[in-house]
Image (cartoon, rainbow, N blue to C red):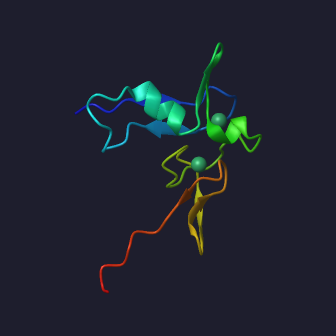
Amino acid sequence: MIRDAVTCDRPLCVAVFLEPDDLPEEQEFETAVAAAGWQHLPDGHACPACLRGKGPVAERGECPGCSGRTVDLPGGMTCEWCGHVEPYPDEEDE
Ligand SMILES: [Zn+2]
Ligand SMILES: [Zn+2]
C-alpha cells in the first residue's frame, strides 16, 4: 500500500502528515488531513503547528498530527509544536 503524505509548505518547517494506517477505505485522505488540523491554502499546505503560530516544526518526532517532537507528560505524549496530545496506550497488565 502506498501511503499518501502531505508536507508543510511554510519555510523551514519539516512537518509531515502521513495517511493513518486505520483510515477507512471510503474516507478521503484530504478529510483526514483537515481533521488533523491542516489547511490547504492557496500557496500550499500549512501544518497545525504553523497555523497556531508554533511553527515552523524544526525537529521530527512521534506526533501523529505533524510528526513533530513530543514530550512525555502525565496526560500523554504531547507535541511541542502543534499541541496534539496522544494518550498512552492502555497497559495490558490489569
Ligand atoms: Zn508547518
Ligand atoms: Zn504535532
For the C terminus, the quadrant is bottom left
Percent position of residue 91, x then y: 36, 78
Q: Which of 25 and 71 is in front in this view?
A: 25
Q: Which of 12 and 93 is in front in this view?
A: 93
Q: Horizontal placement of 36 versus 13: left or right?
A: left
Percent position of residue 84, x then y: 59, 53
**Residue at the bottom extreme?**
94
Residue drawn at (70%, 37%) of the image: 50
Percent position of residue 93, x then y: 30, 85
Residue drawn at (57%, 39%) of the image: 15
**Residue at the top extreme?**
42
* Residue 13 seen in the current view: no
Percent position of residue 49, x then y: 67, 42
**Count of number-bearing discs:** 0
**Residue at the left extreme?**
1
For the N terminus, the quadrant is top left
Q: Horizontal placement of 56 versus 68: left or right?
A: right
